């Protein structure tokens, strides 16, 4: 039970940090920034076709992140069929020779390119032709290559949204700064949840002592109430009911302070013993009177 209280508190703290600060909403890696751009521009990437050109590490990570968002078909392309097959083995998807891209482009909404080519793999004219086949639907191009795989002016083609490594790194840097700015708020949330965990654990430790004290006090109350009710006619229902209600209300009020003391005590069993003795002494005094 102690472990459950701690785990629930930790999960609650994590959920609050994600929802109440920027820590859970600001990707700080290039691959995560790329995926965030896909979501921002295409709204929902589920079912969207993805074309991966080249086998760069960041492109592999990006595609795996996109798969987590349930993208559609993934095509893996390279200048040679052997490389395309190897890329398909690495990432998983349908190998596609580079010359066949044009025939499949109408099924693609996202291009992730990361080759080792020394020149542009896609120039503006090529992208313009591809867009014509897609009826100029929005096309997101993530260029992770150095030097760039996609000519900068390709981003001017209608419907094309082009982001290169510099763009994504800039986003990641800004997000990192925002995350750092959110750290104090996150620390405050964690401190609050730690206090809640501590309070829950203390309450759990105090529970047996609290129950024992409550039973003892309620027993004394019921005993004294029965003694007083014996002096009242059985058919005087209204008076008898009022006395019961008064006794229960006073008991709850009297117990409020001691119960809070027990729950905050480092030794609730000892405190309960002292309090019980005190109530017993008061009870003896009342009985003697």
Image (cartoon, rainbow, N blue to C red):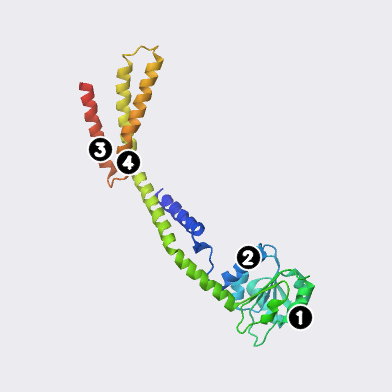
Q: Earlier in the sequence, mark 4 or mark 3?
A: 4
Residue that appears at 29% across and 43% down: 268
Q: CA distance from mark 1 to mark 4?
A: 76 Å
Q: CA distance from mark 2 to mark 1?
A: 30 Å
Against 190, residue 225 (above or below) is: above
Label 4 SS = helix
Using the rendered view, name the quadrant where residue 222 is placed. top left
Q: Where is mark 1, residue-wise?
A: 99
Q: Earlier in the sequence, mark 3 or mark 1?
A: 1
Q: Where is mark 2, residue-wise?
A: 40
Q: In which quadrant is the C terminus drawn?
A: top left
Answer few, some or many: residues within 10 Å of disc 3's Cα (few below 14, many 20 plus, some between 14 and 19): some
Q: CA distance from mark 3 to mark 1?
A: 86 Å
Q: CA distance from mark 4 to mark 2?
A: 50 Å
Q: Which mark is residue 260?
A: 4
Q: Earlier in the sequence, mark 2 or mark 1?
A: 2
Residue 164 visible in this rendered orientation of the protein: yes
Residue 55 image point, x, y percent: 63, 78
Q: Where is mark 3, residue-wise?
A: 273
Q: Earlier in the sequence, mark 1 or mark 4?
A: 1
Residue that appears at 41% across and 60% down: 187
Q: Earlier in the sequence, mark 2 or mark 3?
A: 2
Residue that appears at 45% across and 66% down: 181
Answer few, some or many: residues within 10 Å of disc 4's Cα (few below 14, many 20 plus, some between 14 and 19): few
Please name which of the two marks, 2 or 3, marks the residue nearer to the observer.
2
Label 1 SS = helix
Q: CA distance from mark 2 to mark 3?
A: 63 Å
Residue 179 image point, x, y percent: 48, 66
């Amino acid at each position: 039970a102690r472990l459950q209280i701690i785990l629930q508190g930790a999960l609650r703290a994590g959920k609050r940090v994600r929802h109440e600060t920027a820590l859970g909403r600001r990707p700080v890696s290039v691959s995560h920034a790329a995926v965030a751009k896909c979501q921002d521009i295409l709204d929902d990437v589920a079912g969207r076709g993805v074309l991966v050109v080249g086998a760069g590490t960041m492109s592999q990570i990006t595609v795996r992140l996109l798969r987590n968002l349930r993208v559609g078909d993934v095509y893996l392309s390279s200048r040679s069929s052997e490389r395309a097959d190897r890329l398909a083995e690495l990432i998983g998807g349908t190998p596609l020779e580079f010359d066949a891209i044009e025939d499949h482009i109408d099924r693609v909404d996202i291009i992730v390119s990361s080759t080792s080519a020394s020149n542009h793999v896609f120039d503006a004219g090529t992208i313009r032709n591809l867009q014509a086949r897609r009826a100029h639907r929005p096309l997101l191009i993530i260029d992770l290559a150095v030097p760039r795989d996609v000519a900068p002016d390709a981003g001017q083609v209608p419907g094309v949204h082009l982001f290169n490594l510099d763009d994504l790194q800039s986003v990641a840097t800004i997000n990192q700064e925002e995350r750092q700015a959110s750290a104090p708020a996150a620390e405050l949330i964690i401190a609050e949840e730690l206090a809640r965990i501590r309070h829950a654990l203390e309450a759990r430790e105090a529970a047996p002592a609290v129950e024992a004290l409550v039973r003892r006090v309620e027993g004394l109350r019921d005993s004294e109430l029965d003694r007083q009710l014996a002096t009242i006619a059985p058919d005087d229902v209204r008076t008898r009911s009022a006395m019961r209600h008064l006794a229960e209300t006073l008991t709850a009020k009297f117990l409020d302070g001691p119960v809070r003391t027990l729950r905050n005590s480092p030794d609730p069993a000892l405190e309960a013993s002292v309090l019980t003795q005190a109530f017993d002494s008061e009870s003896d005094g009342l009985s003697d009177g």
